[in-house]
Amino acid sequence: MIQLHDLEFVPFISSKEIKNRVVELTKKIAEDYKGETPVFLGILNGSYQFLASITSHYKADCEVEFTKLSSYQGIHTTTCVRQLIGVENLKNKDIIIVEDIVDTGNTLVSIVENLKALEVKSYRVATLFHKPEAYQKNIKLDYVGFEIPNKFIVGYGLDYDGLGRNLSEIYQLKH
Ligand SMILES: O=P(O)(O)OC[C@H]1O[C@H](OP(=O)(O)OP(=O)(O)O)[C@H](O)[C@@H]1O
Ligand code: HPA
């Protein structure tokens, strides 16, 4: 068990299990993008470990970009369109959105809206974790590492109030 700030977490998914699953997903991506040069677009901050692991196993041509969504402005979050920061030349490119987790899907919707406006050629979604019970959107998730229960997790890029991103395995909130 570990403690981060005021909360306790228990071991959930080992680093070995993560690595094996990332290798499987990367193989599938490589098959699907044979002859193409996809752009792995990491959504900061949480995706950095997952993206590094995918690209270390991806042997064909690819590009890597990182972006961040601007913070919500004001309190009316549902009516606020968030902008992608730091991306310019994605026009006509084949994008693979790389997320650590798709939970409610709100973040993903903003990302996809932005990519459409940037006139990308295509986009697919790779996410290491997905909470089907929490997902309220209908954007297709093309590469999913693990479907998990609707409980808060940390590790491998995912944080609780800034802590836990550096952990190499996944921990789940205790009760
Ligand atoms: O599907 P959703 O309910 O929108 O949640 C998923 C998003 O939440 C986390 O990002 P966060 O905004 O916490 O930023 P971080 O990656 O810097 O931790 C995570 O990295 C996803 O981007
Ligand atoms: O379970 C989670 N853990 C950390 N960050 C998150 N962002 C959405 N869901 C989660």
Image: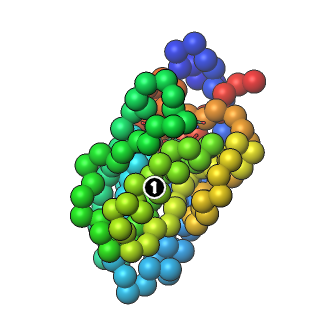
Cβ of disc 1 within 8 Å of ligand 1? no
Which residue occupies the extreme bottom position in the image? 35
Colouring scheme, one of rainbow, by chain, secondary structure, one colour? rainbow
Q: Is residue 45 left or right of residue 143?
A: left
Q: Is residue 88 left or right of residue 115?
A: left
Q: Residue 103: where, in percent of width, then height?
A: 61, 43
Residue under the point 35% across and 68% down: 119
Q: Is residue 49 left or right of residue 18?
A: left
Quarter of the N terminus within the rendering: top right
Name the foreground residue: 116 vs 1.
116
Q: Residue 96: where, in percent of width, then height?
A: 43, 65
Asked if 53 appears above or below 162 in the picture, the reply is below
Q: Secondary structure at mark 1?
A: helix
Query: Toward which corner of the image does residue 83 lie, by quadrant?
Result: top left
Q: Amino acid at mark 1?
A: Glu
The residue at which mark 1 appears reads as 113
Q: Residue 4: where, in percent of width, then height?
A: 53, 20
Label 1: few (<14), some or many (≥20) within 10 Å?
A: some
Query: Toward which corner of the image does residue 63 lie, by quadrant?
Result: bottom left
Name the foreground residue: 63 vs 94.
94
Residue under the point 40% across and 67% down: 95
Name the foreground residue: 25 vs 33.
33
Quarter of the C terminus within the rendering: top right
Q: Is residue 147 left or right of residue 126?
A: right
Residue under the point 52% across and 15% down: 5
Asked if 50 appears above or below 80 in the picture, the reply is below
| Residue 58 appears anywhere in the view | no
Residue under the point 47% across and 48% down: 110
Asked if 162 appears above or below 16 in the picture, the reply is above
Q: Residue 35: where, in percent of width, then height?
A: 38, 86
Name the foreground residue: 31 vs 82.
82
| Residue 99 appears anywhere in the view | yes
